[in-house]
Image (cartoon, helix red, strand yellow):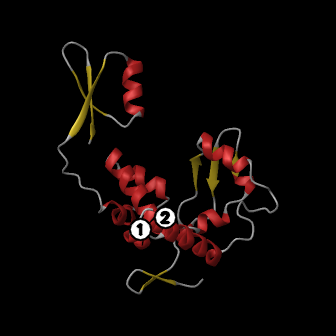
Amino acid sequence: MGSCKAGKGWKYRLKGVGEALSLKWSEIDFENKRFTLNSTEKAGMPRQKRLSDKLASMLSGLPRKNERLFGKANYKYMELQFLIVRKRLATKLQDEKLNEIHFHTLRHWRASREFKKTRSLPHVMELLGHKNLDSVMVYTHLVDTQSDEYYSAVAKTTEEARKLAEDGFEYVCTTPEDLMLFRKEK
């Protein structure tokens, strides 16, 4: 696998794409909308993930010419495609800082976002397939846990509470009037 220059001469390798490249059609369960990552990077933990309706629809429309989902694609090909899309996006949005984003940056962003939402290191550890918490800490350093600005919401019924929880609100308490208070960081 080669490396490419990005930004101020800094070299990087395309990390995090190995799991996608090794994914086989037989590991995708379209009926239950789940897939299994058996071939993990860095001896990670095999894990099952949910397929969104949109992703399941997109994948079901792809041709199945090979055992693997991405056929004979390799790191160099994926790296080249990523760099092309990144450059087009930076040009279109007139934001050169986008050229500093790497494929692995997306993994850091997702892990940081999940940690900020759940405040659960074990959850993020499972999401990433890590075997120990020390590895997860690398991804959570971007999270500012000191925010004190929140949206608030009130639920009167269990159904309203469920909807708020699905929308990312965190349960705070139940009032003496049996109203459930929720909050979500701005």
User: Which residue is label 2 attached to?
Assistant: 89
**Viewer can see residue 131:** no
Q: Amino acid at mark 2?
A: Leu
Can you name the residue that lies furthest to the right here? 65
Q: Is residue 124 above or below residue 82?
A: above
User: Which residue is label 1 attached to?
Assistant: 98
Q: Does residue 160 appear to the left or right of 27 in the view shown?
A: left
Q: Does residue 72 appear to the left or right of 40 in the view shown?
A: right
- What x and y, as percent, mark residue 119? 31, 48
* Nearer to us in this view, 68 or 102: 102
Q: Considering the numbered disc 1 on the image, is that residue within a helix, a strand or a loop?
A: helix
**How crowded is the residue under tag 2: few (<14 C-alpha within 10 Å), some, or many (20+)?**
some
| Residue positioned 39% across, 19% down in the render | 158
The N terminus: image quadrant: bottom right
| Residue positioned 61% across, 71% down in the render | 78
Q: Which mark is residue 122?
A: none
Q: Does residue 124 appear to the left or right of 38 in the view shown?
A: left
Q: Does residue 53 appear to the left or right of 148 in the view shown?
A: right
The disc, 2 or 1, on the residue closer to the chain's N-terminal end is 2
Q: Amino acid at mark 1?
A: Leu
Can you name the residue that lies furthest to the bottom here? 9
User: Looking at the image, do the residues carrying marks 2 and 1 touch, with CB atoms under 8 Å apart?
Assistant: yes
Q: Considering the numbered disc 2 on the image, is that residue within a helix, a strand or a loop?
A: helix
